[in-house]
Each structure stands twice: as structure tokens, then as C-alpha cells.
Image: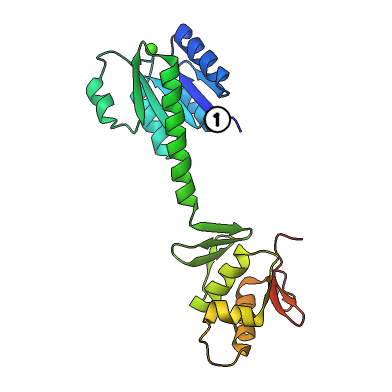
Amino acid sequence: MNKKILIVEDENSIRGFLKINFQRNDFKVIEAETGEEGIRKAMLEKPDVAILDVMLPGIDGFQVCEALRKKYTNIGIIMLTARGQDMDKIMGLEYGADDYVVKPFNPVELILRVKAILRRIDLKVESENGDIVESAPFRLDLYSQRVYKDDSEIDVTPKEYLLFKLFIENPGKAFGRDELLNIVWGYDFVGDPKIVDVNIRRLRAKIEDDSSKPQYIETVWGTGYRWSHGNK
Ligand code: CA
């Protein structure tokens, strides 16, 4: 999917120049002439990156930057500035900008910087989402080991958690009772293998809409169980 870039610049010639260059590089360009317009369009279009001129009529680029950063943690922001202009503010990037470019700028360099920021954001989003497994209506937080259904937490025991994790990460796969016993309880488990069924029954009571007619954890007759959700 094409990345969206918001360009907030009051000078038509510079805005047009930026627009052409980013369009050539397959960006979807959203333009704004004032900071207020930029913030409004950001809400509607949810751009991946914003290029903000510092000197704007009305609120300045720093205020736009601050407003966007507060609302969208993962937007990339590059400030566009004239030489010597507010360099202290810009160098500190205290308003939450990721980078800045001094006019007159080389468009190739600006595009490279935008791409570098996008790569950083993608990595960040990936690692933020890396600990979550989702299969609607369920969500599994691997980091805190919590299970949610429709955003409310389900209280599970450590074994129920492991079972649930195994199922949700392997939709459609049939697990034998011995297999579940080995994976969840360990190879050295000594005891009644019926413990698998007992735990499945408890887990069903917690996650199924109607545990007498389970729709998520299916029974595989003669074998064991499988996570059926997502295959219907
Ligand atoms: Ca300007």
C-alpha cells in the first residue's frame, strides 16, 4: 500500500515541488497550506509521515508538530526550516519531530530521510505488535500472559494459558491428548492423562459462548482437540 504523506507548506511553489517529487516516489500526497488545515487533514487521512514548514500563517509548524505527535505516536515528522531559523528548537527536536531539513533542500535527500523514518516506524510497530496474538474475539498478550475476549480479560490458570496459546497459534491443527500432555505438562508428567480433558473443560467454560456447544475448541473424536475458529 502506498504511504501517505502530509505536506504542510504555505508557499505554493515549494509545496508543488514536494508534491511532484513524492508522487514520483509512489507516495499519496495530502496538501495543506496552513497548520490548522494540516491538523484537520491529518485526522481525516491518517498520514504515515508529515512534512511541516516551520513558518506558517496562523499556528506555526512547531505547534502543528506538537499537536500531531500528541495524537499519533507513530507518525513520522520532518520539519522544514530556513537556514538559522529556530535552530535550537529544531536541534532539540523537543516538539517531537523525527528529523529536519534546511531549505533549500535536495528532494532526493528528503525522500531518503522520509524512507528511513518509515523503516524505523515499521520496526517499532512490529515490535509493539509482536507480543500480541489476535484471533477475534480473542487477544493474547504474550508479554503479560493475559487473555482477552472482546476486550475483557479472562482469568486463566498457567496451564489453561499454555493450552489457549497453543490452540490460537495453530488454528485448525488437531492435537492428540498425548501431544497436549507432552507440550503443556511436559514429558516427565506423571499422573492421569485425563487432566487434559479436565483443563479443556475448564478453559471452554471460560472462553466459549456456550460450553455445551463449543465453537472454538472442537473435539476431534478419538484423538483430542483443535482450534476451529477462523476456519468457519
Ligand atoms: Ca513558510
Where residue 200 sits, quadrant-wise, is bottom right
Which residue is situated farthest in the top direction here?
Answer: 13
From this view, report whether residue 130 is shown above or below residue 148: above
Q: Can you tell me which quadrant of the image ligand 1 is in?
A: top left
From this view, report whether residue 71 is shown above or below residue 145: above
Q: Judging from the image, what secondary structure is the residue with disc 1 in?
A: loop
Tell me the amino acid under the disc marked 1.
Lys
- Nearer to the camera, 134 or 38: 134
Labels in figure, total: 1
Where residue 212 sits, quadrant-wise, is bottom right
Q: Quadrant of the N terminus?
A: top right
Q: Quadrant of the C terminus?
A: bottom right
Residue 20 x, y percent position in the rendering: 54, 13
Tell me if I can see residue 198 in this picture: yes
Residue 157 x, y percent position in the rendering: 50, 78
Residue 215 x, y percent position in the rendering: 72, 69
Q: Is residue 166 left or right of residue 84?
A: right
- Nearer to the camera, 22 or 36: 22
For label 1, count other residues whose C-alpha is less than 10 Å away and answer few (under 14), some (14-19) or many (20+): some
Tell me if I can see residue 35 in this picture: no
Residue at the disc numbered 1: 3
Q: Is residue 100 left or right of residue 39?
A: left
Q: How is the image coloured?
A: rainbow
From this view, report whether residue 162 is shown above or below residue 17: below
Residue 112 x, y percent position in the rendering: 44, 24
Where residue 9 sits, quadrant-wise, is top left
Q: Is residue 140 left or right of residue 76?
A: right
